[in-house]
Amino acid sequence: MTRPSLRRTFGLWLALSLAALIPLAAAMIYVLVLTPALDSLDRSLTDTAVALSQIVEDHGGQISLPISEQTAKALSADLIDQTVFAVADPAGHVLGGSAELAAQAPATLAAGQWLFFDGSMQGRPMRVAAFGYRCAQDGRVCPVLVAETMGKRTAALRAAVLAAAVGALALALPLALLALLAVNRVLRPLQRASDAIGRLSVRQLRPIDAGSMPGEVAGFVQSLNALLARLRDAAGAQRAFVADAAHQLRTPWAIVRVEASELLASEHPAALQPALERLHLAAERGSRLAQQLLSLARTEGAALEARPMPQRVDLRRLAADSANQWLAPALQAGQDLGFDLEPAAVDGYPVLLDELIGNLIHNAIEHAGRGAKVTVRTRTLEERGAELSVEDDGPGVPADERESLWRRFHRGRGAAGSGSGLGLAIVADIARLHGATAAIETTAAGSGFTVRIRFSTPDRPAPPESAVAP
């Protein structure tokens, strides 16, 4: 089903309007050009008729037309048309000229009256001008007629048609172009609003600028902004609930974890050892889950709300600072945690980037298995950017599962450890917030697991070491 289009609707109505107006304009041009031309040709006939009337003489009631052959030829001379004249006395007898033309004289013609009509001679159409001349002292009228063929009038008709066509075309083309420009101009704010709406996402619900919108569109945009505000409030309330719940859970989980550790360290019956280990593991997992929920709420809040300007952050220093936090867990898991760090400056938020690095290292320690080697790397890319990667030589993940690992609460088939499935989802959210790309790689044999984060950095000189935030 074809969706209705404002552009097509505007275009159709404009096309219909032009289809009605352009022929009307052409007809007006035709009339305005042809009428003066024909009037001018008619007036040229009147000049000949007046000249003939001045030759008519009245000698005691005897009306005559003393005209020489040369004068008759001069009055009939024309380069284009054939001109014929006729003068009759009040009784209708021909005094001079064509008898066929004199027979076409109006039956009643008053003194000083002009009549113009179409006639014919020898089967040829003619334009006739008839003039009533008071030729006798008693007031009688002599009809004076001058006719010419239609050559000049046909040419004037062609010129009028050509002028109407050219005028209509010259009017139609600019009007059509202006109509298209007007449609595009009218729809441009709607297109801008559509593009702005298209860029919205669950994590990006910022209001759309209605300042440059026309009044008809501004109301729609303002209503949409009000809806987005309600959605942000709802998302904020949900986020606050998750953060508050996670924050409230941190303390009891911490107490349970400490108590379980103390019970494991103190003397206790051997039969309780498995239960205490499970209790300690559950406390560790619950504490980690609460921390990850807090991180998730913090990341979503940064994506949805106005944020301060990002700082210049050195990933190398952030990764190095995380060594003290993760070396002990790595040793406890029987793994070799190493760092291959080069300077790598990005624009971002230190707290969130530290959380990203921590989640990547924790994910590797949790799933790589005992005896694995985990390496954290940072480097500056040649194509103007920076890269952070955490790799291990553990069992890896099947290719068909890699993309699903970015989803929340999803763990791979047969995943080791007791993770919650939130770590890589938080990494993806933080990377997206920084305009970075996150990818999972494995070796050709399917073993090993590498998460690579690539940041794009603005083209500017690196700041001095003191200006880079840890």
Image (cartoon, helix red, strand yellow):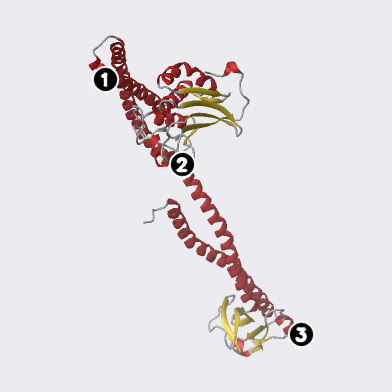
Find the residue positioned furthest to the top: 266
The quarter of the picture where residue 381 lies is top right
Residue 195 against residue 340 in the figure, above or below:
below
The quarter of the picture where residue 380 lies is top right
Which residue corresponds to mark 1? Answer: 274
Image point (62%, 72%), residue name = 156
Q: Nearer the viewer, mark 1 or mark 2?
A: 1
| SS for dot 1 | helix
Q: How many other residues sit within 10 Å of disc 3, few (<14), some (14-19) or many (≥20)?
A: few
Which residue corresponds to mark 3? Answer: 70
Relative placement, left or right, of 118 versus 326 is: right
Residue 7 against residue 35 in the figure, above or below:
above
| SS for dot 3 | helix
Q: Nearer the viewer, mark 3 or mark 1?
A: 1
**Earlier-in-chain disc, 3 versus 1:** 3
Find the residue positioned furthest to the front: 270
| SS for dot 2 | helix
**Earlier-in-chain disc, 2 versus 3:** 3
Image point (43%, 29%), residue name = 427
Q: Please, what is the three-letter code of the amino acid marked with disc 2?
A: Asp
Q: Is residue 313 at least partly visible in the picture?
A: no
Q: How many other residues sit within 10 Å of disc 1, few (<14), some (14-19) or many (≥20)?
A: few
Q: Position of residue 414 (x, y in %)?
A: 35, 34
Which residue corresponds to mark 2? Answer: 195
Q: Which of marks 2 and 3 is in front?
A: 2
Q: Is residue 288 at least partly visible in the picture?
A: yes
Q: Please, what is the three-letter code of the amino acid marked with disc 3?
A: Gln
